Structure formats: C-alpha cells, structure tokens
Image (cartoon, rainbow, N blue to C red):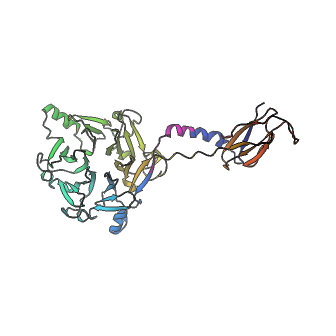
Amino acid sequence: MKNSLKFVSNHQQVMKRFVLPFFTGILATFGAHAQHVTTVAGNGFNAQDLMGLDAVQKSFNSPCDIAFDKKGTMYIADWYNAVIKKMEPGKPVTIFAGTGVPGYSGDEGPATSAQINYPASIAVDTNGNVYVADVYNNRVRKIDTFGIMHTFAGNGTVHYEGDGEIAFMASLHYPCGLATDKKGNVYIADKYNHAIRKVTADGNMYTVIGEAVPVAMEKQILLKEEIKYEPVRLAVNDSGEVFFSTEDNKIQKVTSKGNVVTIAGTGKAGYYGNGGAATTAQLNHPTAICLDGGNNLYFSDLGNNCIRMVTKDGTIRTIAGNTHDGFYGDGGPATDAELNNPNGVAIGNGGSLYFVDGGNQRVRKLYTPAKPTPKKQPEVVASTKIGRFTINLETNPDAHYTAPAFNNLGGANTVPAAPASTYHIGGSSGGGVSAPKPTVNKGKAN
C-alpha cells in the first residue's frame, strides 16, 4: 500500500494553495518575457521650481529626446532648460551644451558657453559628433568631439531654399527631428516646410521628400498628399529608408526608391489595434521613433502615455505604459506603469530601450528582470534504521510540501509539526520492527 506524508505550514490558506497558483500561471503564460521599467536619470523635480544653474544641472524641465554614442554615453535634450545634458556610464548627469538661457551665441567656442534656443531633438554620428535641432533659431547645431559648438545647417531665416548649397547657407523652418546614418548623412525634419532634408557627408543640403523633389508631376502631387501634415521625428535604417512620425497620427516611411508608405496609424487619433496590423491601429500624437537591429520600430505614443512597438512583420503592441498619466511602476512590469507625456526613445548600447518620460522629468528604461532563484526543495533522507527517514524542510511558512514515503508494512503514522524531524513508518509502534528497508522519494514543494 502506498501512502504519502503531507506537510502543511501553520499559515496554510486555501487562497494560497489554490487561487494564487492559478493566477500566477496566467501571469507566467502572458508575461514570461515581459519587460520591467526603471528610472535611470532625473529626480522628478522640475528645474523651473528650483533655483540656479546647479538646479538646472541636477533636474530636468520637460526633457524631450535622447541619443547614445558608441561609448554608451547618453545625451538628453532638456527643452525648457535650453541645454543638452550627458550621462556617461556610471557617472552623474552633467551639462554638455548650453548655458540655460535660451538664445543664439557661442559658435566656434566651448559648447557649454553657447546658447541654444530650445533643443527639440538630438542625434549622434558614428564619429561621436552630436547634432542638436535648435528649433527657434531655425538651425541645426553641431558639437564636435572636442566640445566645440558650430552651426551645421540653417541660416536662421524662415524660408525653403538652399538645396545643393552648403547646409549652413540653406533655410529651415522649425527643424524638430534629426537622424544620422552610417554614411555620414544627417536627416532633418523641416516641419513647417513640409519636407525632410538631408545633409550629405560633403556638407551640402538636399531634399528627400517635399516640394523640391525632382519627379513627375503626378508623383509630386502624391508626395504632397502623403506629407501634407508636418514630419515630426525621424529614424533611418541601414538600407537608407527614412521613417518619420507626423502630426496626423501616422508613422510613415520613405523607401529607398522615394515612395512614401504608411507604417502605422489610420490618421484618426485614438488608442486601438494592439496585436493587429499597425496600419489599422489608432495612435495619438506619435512623436519620437527609433529602430533596433532587427528593424523593429519603437515610438512614443505621447497622447496615449505609452510606448508602442511595430514589429518588422507589421504588428503593433504596447510595451510600456497603461495609458494613464502619472508616475508609477518602477521595478514592475512596464505595461502596468504610468507615464506622463513620453517622448524621446533610443536603443542603448546594451540593447535596452530608453525613453524620456517628459512630464515626470525623468529618463526611464526597459529591462528584462532576472529569473527568481528557485526555492530549495525539502530533502528526504532514509536512515540506516529500518522503517525510519528524515525530512529537512526549508523554513518557508507559505510553502506546502508532499514527501511520499512508504514500505511494505504501511505508511507514516506521524504528522510533522516542525521543519526538520524523523518520522516512523511501520506496522508496529513497538521498537523492533522487522520490515524491508523503506522506499523514500524526495519531497517537493506544491
């Protein structure tokens, strides 16, 4: 006859035994690869509410974009502070460019002594030069690897001209998005010119899409129709395709052949479509975008207070944010967290996704939590005495253990009351039991 010896802690509850394992199983099924979220920079205070340059350095004021260089240094566009900050691995945040006073000054001198008139976007090239969309100066600025500030593109006038000329002689109108490629090209979302411009490695300005595209009239009309709402932010893949978010709640792509196609969004503001085709989903003010090495696209759905992803097969899903504005959830699943006007997104050198949580004055990142260490199972050891065995349990009051133990004469006749004891199995309560050596199976936690 086979009997089992069951060990139940003094804190046994029916819910712990039956209900919680059921829901844990559900969470494990849907969240086995779920990302968690944590804060990597920012204290949540608005620098405007504090005083002095020290406050500007330590606190953000509506940060709006981030980018990384090859060394893993993170650069942050701090909008209302009118500065660019940087955070080297293992070091605190410092000011990289700007004085904290909006304006236009300081070219050919130290970037920390130069004025920026509200930085909207940043990008880093393969050589480590940092580019800044200096929107209200209608320019793109460049900080070289020596920390010197230059005007890279735009002459400060609000026009649409300069194709084929040196970029700093051309005109821009509210340049608000930047991207670089491996060939040394810099792409600019020239928002109110309804165009995407490109500065080639030789320093000349050209139009990628917009009024100056030299194509047949019918194609030109099509392109105007596709981009009649202003481009906001940009990303470029290794094939030279340019992705951009728009004010009409879409994310679109310029193919290598110059065609414009929609990647996500119907044009109607809303929050809809997770798990389905991104082209049938509703977005609400998509802003910053980035790509990973597998051509998956990530974007901040600012009006929905979440970060969403479009896989390379065109499926959309939310990866961070529960759509409620607030600050909540660090250390837990990213889709349970609250965000507040998320903006810039970037892939860090380790492959993690970082994003600006602008309304919370923070930079946060997604990470894969470590697998929990499995609890030690109870050890069941047979003694040399016939009909006896020892069970050593972990002192875990919330665990339930079952340790089968039996021999030819019967089952255990003692229910344990302590974590580690010796229990008698046998057909007689007297001392001398003549029976085969018991078979003992290792116990396990239920």
The answer to which quarter of the image holds residue 239 is top left
In the rendered view, tell whether residue 439 sits above or below residue 369: above
* Image location (x, y in percent) of residue 234: 27, 45
Between 4 and 117, the one nearer to me in the picture: 4
At horizontal 16% and vertical 35% (from top left) the residue drawn is 220
Side of 30 where 396 appears, left or right: right
Between 83 and 238, the one nearer to me in the picture: 238
Between 331 and 361, the one nearer to me in the picture: 331
In the rendered view, tell whether residue 111 sits above or below residue 379: below
Image quarter where the N terminus lies is top right
The answer to which quarter of the image holds residue 130 is bottom left
Name, please, the residue furthest toward the front. 384
In the rendered view, tell whether residue 313 sits above or below residue 154: above
The number of numbered badges drawn on the structure is: 0
Magenta stretch in the rendered image: 25-37
Between 39 and 71, the one nearer to me in the picture: 71
Reply yes or no: does residue 28 show up in magenta.
Answer: yes
Image quarter where the C terminus lies is top right
* Image location (x, y in percent) of residue 123: 27, 51
In the rendered view, tell whether residue 323 sits above or below residue 255: below
The answer to which quarter of the image holds residue 14 is top right
